[in-house]
Image (cartoon, rainbow, N blue to C red):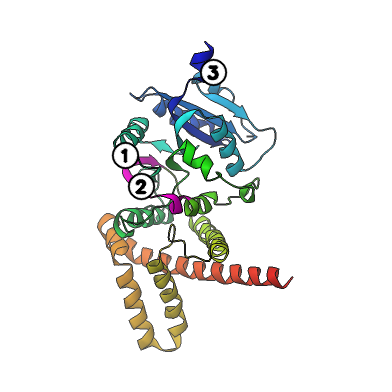
């Protein structure tokens, strides 16, 4: 019996959970319908207000509960340390897999034995019905499938990402900097930077889960906060981390600011807007194809706004770092 408990396995699914019991049941129901059997599921409950302990009686999971809310990064680390699998499959607690996710992960690492990490895609049109949710869906889809350099590094998405356990711990996992309860600290961005220096992060569009995106306020908050962290990494590492934002995207972002500054010169502003549209043409054409012309026009203005938010986040981050240095 002891050997059965401690034997190594192929895949450990690690989930940081806070409430969302109904979505967790859907997620687990899907996972346990897999044809792949060499896996375990570890759920660490980050002091939910809902009772998630009954999941352990419904599914053969390993269930742990934090006494206090520790934050998603530390909770993911607790789950990873408990895991026995050669591969760690990180999932958000509110995603819904499509197809046989575990079989797909095993297939990839079996055919790519030297690969270190694999990211999938979170979000489908089925879950996202509002304009801004669908904007985020197609914005991400365009980046991952149409715009990103397939020969460069991809972002390791903790919402749907698989990584060799040995590699994860060699890189130190998520450092104490990100252990902040109740705060979305974007530990995946920092980790992706370190992982990209070690090896390529592959992307598989067939590794897909459904995920609900938020509205405009959520978009603005996420872009602003990620920009602050991005600038901090940029300053600390003294290297442009093209994991989440490429140098080409940076040029597009700067161009959005120039468009606004040129408002006093309408002919110049028109030229800059045309250049901005040309740089975003793949995304805007995708929106037109999928949602129609009106949606594409709305996507243009939303994209422009978020680029300006990124500029604002960058300015804020630089000022904050300057104040810390002077202090």
Q: Quadrant of residue 326?
A: bottom right
Q: Which mark is residue 57?
A: 3
Alpha carbon of mark 3 to alpha carbon of mark 2: how far?
36 Å
What span is colored magenta in the figure?
A: 195-210
Residue at image x 40%, y 67%?
249
Quick one: 319 or 154, which is closer to the camera? 154
The percent coordinates of residue 29 (x first, y second) are 42, 26
| Prevailing secondary structure class for the magenta stretch in the rendered image | strand
In the rendered image, the vertical position of residue 27 relative to residue 229, given as above or below: above
Q: Which residue is mark 1?
A: 112
The percent coordinates of residue 15 (x first, y second) are 52, 35
The crowd level at tag 2 (other Cα within 10 Å; few <14, some 14-19, many 20+) is many
Residue at image x 63%, y 72%?
319
Secondary structure of residue under mark 3: helix
Q: Can you say which quadrant of the picture contains the C terminus?
A: bottom right
The crowd level at tag 3 (other Cα within 10 Å; few <14, some 14-19, many 20+) is few
Q: Which residue is mark 2?
A: 202
Alpha carbon of mark 1 to alpha carbon of mark 3: how far?
36 Å
Is there a contact, CB below 8 Å, between mark 3 and mark 2? Answer: no
Q: Quadrant of residue 135?
A: bottom left
**Earlier residue among tags 2 and 1:** 1
Is there a contact, CB below 8 Å, between mark 2 and mark 1? Answer: yes
**Earlier residue among tags 3 and 2:** 3
């Amino acid at each position: 019996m002891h050997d059965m408990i401690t034997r190594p396995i192929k895949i450990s699914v690690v989930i940081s959970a806070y409430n969302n019991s109904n979505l967790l049941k859907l997620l687990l129901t899907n996972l346990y319908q897999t044809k792949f059997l060499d896996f375990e599921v570890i759920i660490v409950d980050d002091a939910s207000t809902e009772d998630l302990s009954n999941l352990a009686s419904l599914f053969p999971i390993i269930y742990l509960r934090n006494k206090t809310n520790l934050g998603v990064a530390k909770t993911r680390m607790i789950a990873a340390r408990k895991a026995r699998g050669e591969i760690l499959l990180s999932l958000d607690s509110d995603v819904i897999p499509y197809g046989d996710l575990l079989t797909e992960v095993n297939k990839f690492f079996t055919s790519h034995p030297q690969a270190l990490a694999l990211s999938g895609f979170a979000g489908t049109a089925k879950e996202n019905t509002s304009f801004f949710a669908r904007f985020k869906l197609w914005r991400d889809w365009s980046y991952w499938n149409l715009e990103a350099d397939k020969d460069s590094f991809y972002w390791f998405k903790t919402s749907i990402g698989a990584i060799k356990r040995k590699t994860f711990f060699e890189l130190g996992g998520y450092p104490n900097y990100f252990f902040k309860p109740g705060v979305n600290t974007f530990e995946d961005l920092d980790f992706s930077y370190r992982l990209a220096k070690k090896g390529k992060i592959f992307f598989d569009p067939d590794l897909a889960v459904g995920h609900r995106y938020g509205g405009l306020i959520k978009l603005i908050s996420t872009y602003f906060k990620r920009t602050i962290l991005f600038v901090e990494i940029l300053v600390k590492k003294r290297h442009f981390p093209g994991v989440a934002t490429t140098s080409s995207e940076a040029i597009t972002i700067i161009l959005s600011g120039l468009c606004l500054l040129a408002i006093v010169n309408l002919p110049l502003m028109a030229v800059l807007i045309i250049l901005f549209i040309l740089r975003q043409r793949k995304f805007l054409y995708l929106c037109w194809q999928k949602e129609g012309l009106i949606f594409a026009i709305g996507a243009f203005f939303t994209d422009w706004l978020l680029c300006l938010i990124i500029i604002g986040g960058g300015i804020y981050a630089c000022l904050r770092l300057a104040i810390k240095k002077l202090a």
